[in-house]
Structure formats: structure tokens, C-alpha cells
Image: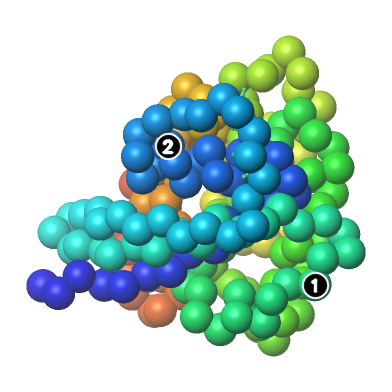
Amino acid sequence: MLPKQRKIAIMGYRSVGKSSLSIQFVEGQFVDTYDPTIENTFVKTTKIKNQEYDLKLVDTAGQDEYSILPIQYSMDIHGYVLVYSITSPKSFKIIQIIYDKLLDMAGKVHVPVVLVGNKKDLDMDRVVTQMEGQKLADSWKSVFFESSAKQNECIADIFHTMLMEIEKANGNTVVQEYNKCSIL
Ligand SMILES: Nc1nc2c(ncn2[C@@H]2O[C@H](COP(=O)(O)OP(=O)(O)OP(=O)(O)O)[C@@H](O)[C@H]2O)c(=O)[nH]1
């Protein structure tokens, strides 16, 4: 079977861990320093049940409420990993704005999305509850994860689930294997 080409954008407010999630998934390491991203693309091949995927991850520059999303994000992207930090109420507010802008731009009522509350290792500084994240994902009919790029928790699951959500959006039936990372 030929590999399927898939392009995924990782979006969210500044400093929520978008690059860290990408680097942890692609390179298996965590970098503690903060280096703001302009835009970066990572590539990785991954296999799910005998199907290979050539993945392109577009690690976007952090967005805020005033950001105008580049039009190409509505054209050649198959799915979106939308990230906030459980320690930042602002990042949680912004992720809702980004989602609305994405739908607007795509001119669709549904786009394949996985919602991620990152930095779950910083539970002492938590301000966004798991329930709040889950409710938001439910309202989008998307899957929700809490993750830690630092501790490599739930990272591969995020991207594998994203691929399955894209399959579903393409009308393919998938047997979703939920595990301890996905919160339903
Ligand atoms: N404790 C903890 N820190 C994290 C985690 N993920 C990222 N960080 C830290 O948060 C800071 C920002 O991480 P980045 O991955 O650069 O965030 P970003 O969303 O790509 O930032 P922008 O490029 O500005 O959009 C860095 O200091 C990271 O080390 C995590 O899961 N846990």
C-alpha cells in the first residue's frame, strides 16, 4: 500500500508547547528553552495498522485574538491540532477564537480537529480544568487530550488520533482505539 500524504497544522497561543509537541513526536526529545517559532515544518513517517503515512507537521507561529490566519492554512491542511496550556486561561480563550476563524476560513461546519491541553505535568499551576477542555471538545465533536511534551505523555496518541479523524472526515470507517490518554 502506498503511503498516504497528510499535512497537519499545530495551532494555538504563544508558548503553549506547539514546537515541543512536534519535536517530542518527531525527534523524541524535549527542549526546555523557549524559542518563538515563525513557522517550521517537520516530517515523519508513521504506520497505523499496515497503512503508512508521510506526515508533514506545520508548527505555526503562536496566534492571538488579533491574528489573521494565513489563507493557505485552509487549503492544503488535512487536520488541525489545536493546543492550549492548562496553566494559561488566555490560551484557552484564544483556542476558541482560532477554531471559529478556521471554520470561517474553511467555509465548513466541521474540520478534523484534535484539542490538546498541554503542560499537564504542571498540575500545581493548573487553571483550566479537564472538564472545561472536554466540554469544549464535545461542542466541536472532536477528541480531547491532555498531554505533557516534557514527560512525553500522550504525544503519539495525539497525532495518531488526528490521522484517524482525517480518515473519518474522508468517509473512511475507522475503529477508534481509545486509551488512557483520550478523554471522552
Ligand atoms: N513543564 C512543561 N513545559 C513545557 C511543555 N511543553 C512546552 N513547555 C515549555 O514551554 C515553553 C514554550 O514551548 P514551545 O514549544 O516553544 O511553545 P510554542 O507554542 O511553540 O511557542 P511559540 O513558538 O511562541 O508559538 C518552553 O520553555 C517549553 O520548554 C510541557 O508539556 N510541560
The answer to whether residue 183 of the structure is visible from this angle is: no
What percent of the width, then of the height, locates residue 8?
48, 64
Query: Circle 2 — which element?
Result: helix
Q: Which residue sits at x=40%, y=79%? A: 170
Residue sitting nearer the eye, 115 or 84: 84
Q: Amino acid at mark 1?
A: Ile
What percent of the width, then of the height, locates residue 125?
77, 18
Q: Residues within 10 Å of mark 2 (few under 14, many from 20)?
A: many
Q: Residue furthest top?
A: 124
Q: Which residue sits at x=80%, y=34%? A: 88
Q: Quadrant of the N terminus?
A: bottom left
For label 2, the residue is 24
Q: Amino acid at mark 2?
A: Gln
Q: Is residue 56 rendered to the left or right of residue 72?
A: left
Residue sitting nearer the eye, 94 or 111: 94
Residue sitting nearer the eye, 55 or 102: 55
For label 1, the residue is 68
Q: Is mark 1 within 8 Å of ligand 1?
A: no
Of the residues under marks 1 and 2, which one precedes in the sequence?
2
Q: Which residue sits at x=51%, y=67%? A: 79
